[in-house]
Amino acid sequence: MENSKNESRDLFPGALEMMILESLRRQPAHGYALVQHIQQRSNNLLQVEEGSLYPALQRLLKGKLVKAEWTVSPSTNRRVRVYQITKNGLLHLEREISSFDRMLEGIQMVLGPQKRNATS
Amino acid sequence: MSWFERIFRRRRLYDELSEEIHEHIEEKIEQIMRLENLSRPAARQAALRAFGNVTLLEERSRGVWQWSTLESILADLKLTLRRLRRAPGFAATVLLTLAIGIGANTAVFSVINSVLLKPLPYPDSNRLIALRLDAPGAGGLASFNSGLAVSPSMYLTFAEHNRTFQSIGLWSSSTANITGVEQPEWVQADQVSDGVLQTLEVPPLLGRWFSSADQDPHGSKTAMLSYGYWQRRFGGDRGVIGRAIQVDAQTRTIVGVMPRGFRMVDRDFDLLVPFALDRSQLKLAPFCCNGIGRLKPGVSLGQANADIARLLPLWMDSWSNGPGTNPHWYEKWKISPNFTPLKRQVIGDVGNVLWVVMATIGVVMLIVCMNVANLLLVRAESRHQEISIRAALGAGRARIARELLLESVVLGLIGGVLGVGVAAAALRLLVSIGPANLPRLSEISLDARSVAFTFAISLFSGLLFGSLPTWKYAFRRRSTLLDGSVRTTSISRERHRARNVLVITQVAMALVLLVCALLMVRTFAALHNVDPGFSDSPHIQTVSMWIPDQLISDSAMVTRTENDITDKLAGIPGVTSVGFAGAVPMDGNQPNWDTLYLKGKDYGATEPPIRFFNYISPGFFHAMGTRLVAGRDFTWSDIYSLRPTVIISENLARESWGSAQGAIGKQVREFSSMPWQEVIGVAEDVHTLGLDEKAPATVYWPAMLRNPYNPQPMIMPSRFITFAIHTNRAGTASLQSEMQQAVSSVNASLPLASVQTMQDIYGKSLARTSFTLVMLGIAAAMALALGIIGIYGVISYAVSQRTREIGIRLALGARKNELRWMFVRPALVLTGVGVLIGLGAAVAVARLMRTLLFGISPLDPLSFVAVPLILVLAAALASFLPASRVATVNPVDALRVE
């Protein structure tokens, strides 16, 4: 029951992980920076609960798709844990994006252009 | 990352996570304060709102690292334990049954492990062997169990010329009088040669081992102490080395102390004394001692046998039995080495008994498992609906199977833990009873291997008795499960089939065990019916004494002293008769075996057979209650005047002259240089070697006679004697102190030894049979009880399941007797099938235990008829009791059940 609220914001399982990996592919970042980055890039369309980032990061860590290191941030002078994408992470990201593209395409084909026009 | 690394890393992972989240929120707060110019508390609230539920998110992040299968098993485990707590009657029954079953198995396994499986407590003990010699031509001198003993001259020959041994030694159990203390003490003083301690390779705690110098008869006299004697007598004083001790009136210097727990092969001892081997005096005989040796690495028993066989002719060439004797006479004995591992000699034939006991206890464990399986089936049946619903809701078969199996394995393991407690108690009991012929008793313990065995057997039995309900309820077609939950459960043959098979098997196994137990009871009874050749054994006190050369050297004086002591003992109030002999029946002493020539019989080139010799005083037969069949007893005047007289046993008289009466006045002798001796009496046969052995043909010589072995005229007294004292005070402490006073009044330096009643000795000779009997009896009683519980359970459950049907039948006019019979009949059918199967198995098992039986056939008709009857009666009773509940069924209530 507790999960349902979060999952509705998470769009679909794996979407958040995909966005994290994509962000990290551009540059390593710590958790707070990742949230900022995702919110800016999505023009705040995706109302991601900041905390839900952390279970996703732990899953990526466990799967060895990212690695983490503690450093001190030069801008804020705080101890931060900076995540970096691994080689496995890159491969995974590519596979996920292509399967996501296929899925999106499929969904669009089912929904059809009229429906999309109607909503936009 | 391996799983345990992950468990240990978890702590750090969680800490890092918490810190990370904390930093995130702090950063957010600062940013909000900066950008929106809010106060810190307000900014904090906004930051937390944006972040979400911190606790929940942290929990979910941690969840990523957790092991979901393990954690769900733990949850199942908790559920199982809670469920067992809710059914205390069921849990207690199952756990008690299991604890007893597993406990009995663990106890017996521990005995087998300690006695049979563990190596002897010496370094590299697999290279230790017993120098056992076969000598088929030596008659009773070479017993079936231990073969021919080794003579000192053999030992010297073997030790000096062998090529296969690292070391060889000779030892003999013996006793000695310790004097020079306030109370003379009688101790176990084993004699050992050079090479014994070197063979056993246990270093001394203090001082040194014996060496060849110590066995020089003209050298200094030395002795070593056991740990126990060192503690008892010297209070563990480390300065004891070099002190003097009076052993048999001889001063010896203590040169070493052996460590705690060191035993002479399988004997406790107080002192070790070196043999005094005088090469110039040694002869081929006597065959007195135990030989042990340590093989060189890589040498096999066969090579050692061949090596020593080569040395036997050399032995006969090198030594003789005195002038005028033929040293190669022993070729007739056909001596050949038949060495055995020392461990096998120590264990003896107890292995058979132990394996039989292990097998029976294993069968009991199977019955235990079946009973528990039965209980679990009943329980699973009552959970039948719950399981069906779970299956319908999508629980996988594996998930349900896992839960059912988990329950039974948990029961098995808890039962195992309780079982270890039962086993520990049982072993303590066993050691305190101390069955006389169980070797290595002091080494019996619950060690790691026993605990591993318990764990394995608990796990295995848990899986075994759990597999049946699991298979039935998890892996069966679902569709049948939900439909007939109430209305049609009444008669489902299929449902009962598994439990019927269990009952049949239980009955069959119980039958086998009961037959075996009854065979042992019959054996025991048959042994009890053997007339041992003495009577009133509870009222015969025996006590041994040894008069060493150093104490009284004059032979006639020895006998005079023994006579005086006999008279003093007879004067003790309550004593009715006293006599003494070289050995009392069944005490394990065998004074002598030799040939006996009958006058007037032509032996040609052959030797007459070897007979058992004993040396007795007047009155010995009377004190033992041994009847004189013909003739008369010795008198003291016969003995002092050295009259050439002898008494023989009835079987020897019949064999030689056809009747007891016919033997009186006939003449016999030991060998040609001995004057003929007249037979003056014939005594009834005595089972000297044990109740299950035939009474040996026996020759009773007077306690003092002309030494037949020595060419010069010399008198030979009996220096080691055992008194038989007939009194109704036998076994009391007051009698013992009066006996000591009586002996001290004649000679203050003589201690008493081996104080026991004839009943004790008699009981020891029955020890193996009674041990087996008790163990089998316990197993059979458990099997019978479990079988009855099994039948009772099945019928009782059937009655409760068929209450509706009974109600309908009653309402339609069925009579209660017919209804009862409806339940008793299937129980009797099941029992009948079980009995038939069991009889077949029992025939096979009884043949296997033939060596343990005495006086009855393995197919003893009484046992094979009585046991099935007992079982059928028990089954009838066990089914009749629940079946009579039918009478209490009220049709109206029965039909209103729902």
Image (cartoon, coloured by chain):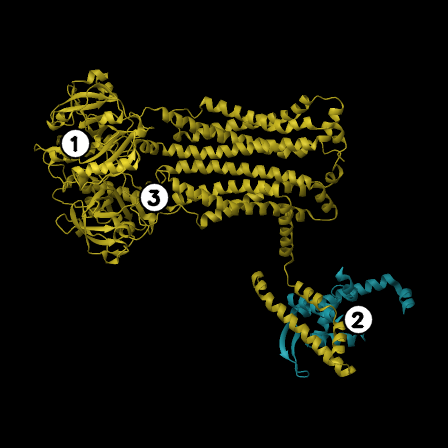
Chain colours: A cyan, B yellow
What residue did someone put label 1 on? B563
What residue did someone put label 2 on? A47
Cβ–Cβ below 8 Å for labels 1 and 3?
no
Side of B576 where B110 appears, left or right: right
| Near-viewer residue (A1 or B841) | A1
Side of B141 where B504 appears, left or right: right
Side of B147 where B553 appears, left or right: left
* Rendered image quadrant of residue A93: bottom right
**Numbered disc 2: secondary structure:** loop
Side of B658 where B778 appears, left or right: right
Looking at numbered disc 2 in the image, what kind of residue is underneath it?
Answer: Gln
Mark 1 burial class by Cα count in 10 Å: few <14, some 14-19, many 20+: some
Q: Residue at left 41%, top 24%?
A: B857
Q: Are marks 1 and 3 on the same chain?
A: yes
What residue did someone put label 3 on? B343
Chain identity of mark 2 = A
Image quadrant occupied by the N terminus of chain A? bottom right
Nearer the observer: mark 1 or 2; the answer is: 1
